[in-house]
Image: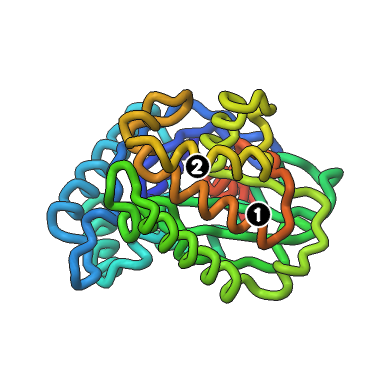
Amino acid sequence: MRLGVLDVGSNTVHLQVVDAHPGARPSPATNQKVELRLHEYLNISGEIAPEGVELLETAIADAISHAKEFKTEEILAFATSAIRDAKNGKEILLQINKKFDIDLQVLSGDDEARMTFLAVRRWLGWSSGRLLVLDIGGGSLEIAVGDDESAEATVSLPLGASRLTREYLSSDPHTSKEIKSLENYVIEAVKSSVPEDIMEHIADHFVATSKTFRTLARLGEHWFDDNPKYLKINSLTKMIPKLQAMSNKERAELPGVSQSRARQIVAGAIVARTTMERLHINELEICPWALREGIVLRWLDWMER
């Protein structure tokens, strides 16, 4: 059957249409993405401002229209940290679901981590052993570890690249004071909030998903001739000062770095490096499947019951 996965994230509203059935690999048919950056519309009260809500509704209307054009039978709609964190998030959900007759649900951070873990396990298979999976989104960092298809331990931290850029990196180029303040915050957050069962992961295979990690791996290839399917801690450590010294315009001219991604890649790199160091990871394999694929796979599992 043809499914639409509508991902209302902190950075984008992304519709991915796939052909899928139980026991088969989901096959992408089309996708549509709108750069929205909902976190930037949070006001001082912690609510998404009316302008942001209006842009969100327009993006969802366009996504639903695109899904209908491609004869999508079912739309699986979910929202992550931007809606989850907003004080008026529940009101926005009720308004959207009533207006568009969909069932947009907010995923918890742990649900994000579990769904992403499932996608990685299905992509890599059982031979990949015990997995430790990292994902850096616009609003949060998710970590999951386990031997099976269900992660046995998860954590979600408010360390998304877009969120941290907005809160710490306002200058262009970034100042040394801003960078130091951000680094100290990320180090303390990871140190104090990652639970022992993840710290003592005993993993065989270290994996990363998300655009942030893919972009960093691509830069490792560009500067150090690394395999873009992997991100090495040594290369990451060397590329961060290069990125910090650049303006947003200069970063946007790097291969694989869009203009919007250029603003937040430094924050994402600092989170990636800190997490890898804290968890003693020398290299991460980049997995092409992530949260959206996990949502599809879990839905297909439910349909088989």
Please indicate whether residue 222 sits to the left or right of residue 75 in the image.
right
When the figure is inspected, residue 57 is found, relative to residue 168, above or below; the finding is above
Q: Position of residue 189 (x, y in %)?
A: 52, 70
When the figure is inspected, residue 14 is found, relative to residue 130, above or below; the finding is above
Q: Within 10 Å of the Cα at label 2, are there few (<14), some (14-19), or many (20+) other Cα atoms?
A: few
Whether residue 74 is visible to the viewer of this picture, yes or no, is: no
Tell me the SS state at disc 2.
helix
Q: Residue at x 60, y 44 (%)?
A: 237
Closer to us: 284 or 155: 284
Whether residue 41 is visible to the viewer of this picture, yes or no, is: yes
Q: Position of residue 33 (x, y in %)?
A: 35, 35
Q: What is the quadrant of residue 177 in the picture?
A: bottom left
Tell me the SS state at disc 1.
helix
Closer to us: 283 or 70: 283
Q: Amino acid at mark 2?
A: Pro
Please indicate whether residue 28 sits to the left or right of residue 130 in the image.
left
Q: Which mark is residue 241?
A: 2
How far apart in space, not on screen, are marks 2 and 1 (Cα)?
A: 17 Å
Q: Residue at x 71, y 75 (%)?
A: 196
Q: Position of residue 147 (x, y in %)?
A: 80, 58
Q: Within 10 Å of the Cα at label 1, are there few (<14), some (14-19), or many (20+) other Cα atoms?
A: some
- The residue that disc 1 covers is 276
Closer to us: 191 or 230: 191
Q: Amino acid at mark 1?
A: Met
Q: Residue at x 66, y 62 (%)?
A: 278
